Each structure stands twice: as structure tokens, then as C-alpha cells.
Amino acid sequence: MRVSVFGSAHPEPGDVDYLQAYHLGKLLAEQGHIVLNGGYVGTMEAVSKGSAEAGGHVIGVTCDVIEKWRNTKPNPWVHEVLHNSDLIGRLSGLVKNCDAAIALPGGVGTLAEIALTWNMIILESIPLPYLLLVGDAWQKVIQTFYAEMPDFIPSSVRTYIRFCSSIEDAVAELNSYS
């Protein structure tokens, strides 16, 4: 199964979020999953490294815009690159090329990935049954969204989001529908 992992570019080696992403990459590879991610630093680097060191295959979905803005190239644990010219193509590549998606803690970019994936699931333009969000913070964000705009988010749409308290829970949930 191809699993897209979304998360922040900010975690550095040794940070709790970096170690969590590394462990997720390792667990996914040990289960035989292919990992897709944004291909650069932070969570993306950690999940790539964890997967690669466990013998997994890593696909980095990259773009010119980020490489110019950050003056960077894909991290060394990416085995295959799906390169795009712009950010929209990159986001689309992450979402359209996966069989499952997991979001770790992150910022605006991660929120954009969550929103696009969720909307594409709702519109049935991708075959994912749901999106897995790891950590209490995402649950608080989404629950606040539900509470503040209840008329716009029917209960049927809410079923496409699954909250997981840990990466182990996310992998178990992922394996339950793989």
C-alpha cells in the first residue's frame, strides 16, 4: 500500500516529533508499505529515513517552488522523486498517488494537505476510506471546526476523519483496512 505521510518541515533530528516520524516510517516499511511524503526536511526527512533504514521504498513528491524558496533538494533517503513545477501539483501528487494518508503534527502546509485529502475523499475522487490524524492537537482543531460550523459539516462527512492518539494506533488502523 502507498501511504502518504503529512507533517511539518520544522522538526530536527532528536526532537520528539522527528523521532515519532522516524518511527512511523520504520513501522510502515516493516509492514511492507511504500511511503510518500513531501521529500525534504523535518517530518519528511524523518519518515523517509525510518522507512529507508527499515528496507522500505520512499517516494518524495517535490516541486520547484519549495526548492527555490528553501534552496534545497530531496533528502538522501528518497528513492524515487515525483517532481512538480508548483505547490498545487505537489499537493495533488501526494494525494492522488496514495492508498492511505496519515497526518502528523504540522502547520499550514499540513493543514492544506489534510483539507485537500478530506475534500477529495468526500467528492469520491480518490479511493481512500478515511484520513488518519495523529495527536490530540489535530483532534482539537477539527472538533473546533465541527463545533463552530456545524451546518456546513454533516455527520456523514465527519466519518472520513479518524483520530489516532499515537503512530502505533494509526498503523493499526491503517492495517485494518489494507
Image: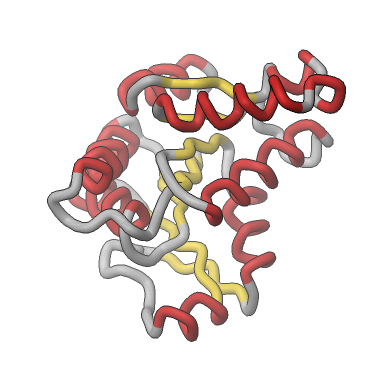
Q: Residue furthest left?
A: 14
Instruction: Judge left or right: residue 50 versus residue 177.
Output: left
**Residue 115 in sight in this render:** yes
Spot occupied by residue 135 in the image (x, y as percentages of width and height): 40, 28
Q: How many marks?
A: 0
Instruction: Judge left or right: residue 14 versus residue 23.
Output: left
Say which residue appears at 50% left-offset and 21% top-offset.
163
Instruction: Judge left or right: residue 62 versus residue 127.
Output: left
**Which image quarter: residue 21?**
top left
Question: In the picture shown, does residue 41 fall above or below 72?
Answer: above
**Residue 55 in sight in this render:** no
Question: In the picture shown, does residue 166 fall above or below 104?
Answer: above
| Structure colour scheme | secondary structure
Spot occupied by residue 40 in the image (x, y as percentages of width and height): 38, 66
Question: In the picture shown, does residue 147 fall above or below 98?
Answer: above
Say which residue appears at 36% left-offset and 56% top-offset.
44
Query: Residue 30 versus residue 6: which sits nearer the camera?
Result: 6
Spot occupied by residue 168 in the image (x, y as percentages of width and height): 31, 22
Spot occupied by residue 165 in the image (x, y as percentages of width and height): 38, 20
Query: Residue 49 versus residue 161: which sits nearer the camera?
Result: 161
Instruction: Judge left or right: residue 159 versus residue 43.
Output: right
Say which residue appears at 30% left-offset and 37% top-offset.
24
Say which residue appears at 68% left-offset and 65% top-offset.
88
